[in-house]
Amino acid sequence: MAIGHRVLVSHDRRTMLNCFRERLASGRSSPGLLVVAQDAPIPPVVETVILLWAAMDPAELLNQARHLPSLSRHVFPR
């Protein structure tokens, strides 16, 4: 089955990272995975995803899993 060209955003760190690794290990590719802290408030997460979408070349996320908590220190209020 062919994959779409959409980056997956998930808070399910354990399951999704394992599936992501397995997918890459099997020789398939992925447009990317963004992992968000489960307790992160939704509005800043959406703003961050939109900012990344506007600022990044999609090729930068190809076959990459990125954690947004590192951005949360600068974006999400605590």
Image (cartoon, rainbow, N blue to C red):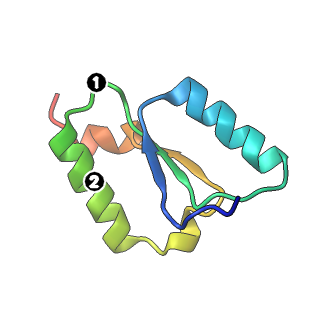
Residue, disc 2 = 48
- Looking at the picture, which amino acid does disc 2 mark? Thr
Relative to 2, is 14 on the left or the right?
left
Q: Specify the quadrant of the image occupied by residue 15.
A: top right
- Estimate the x, y position of residue 21 in percent, counting from the top left: 72, 40
Using the image, determine if residue 15 lies above or below residue 64.
above
Q: Secondary structure at mark 1?
A: loop
**What residue lies at 84% left-to-right and 55% top-to-bottom?**
27
Residue type, label 1 = Asp
Seen as rendered, the residue at the extreme front is: 1
**Closer to the camera in the image, 54 or 11:** 11
Residue 42 in the image, given as x and y percentages of width and height: 20, 39
Using the image, determine if residue 13 lies above or below residue 44: above
Read off the residue under disc 1: 39
Q: Position of residue 78 (x, y in %)?
A: 17, 27
Residue occupying the point 28% across, 53% down = 48
Of callouts 1 and 2, the N-terminal one:
1
For disc 2, the neighbor class at 10 Å (few under 14, some 14 to 19, many from 20) is: some
Tell me the residue at 71%/59% (across/down): 29
Q: Which mark is residue 17?
A: none
- Give the secondary structure at mark 2: helix
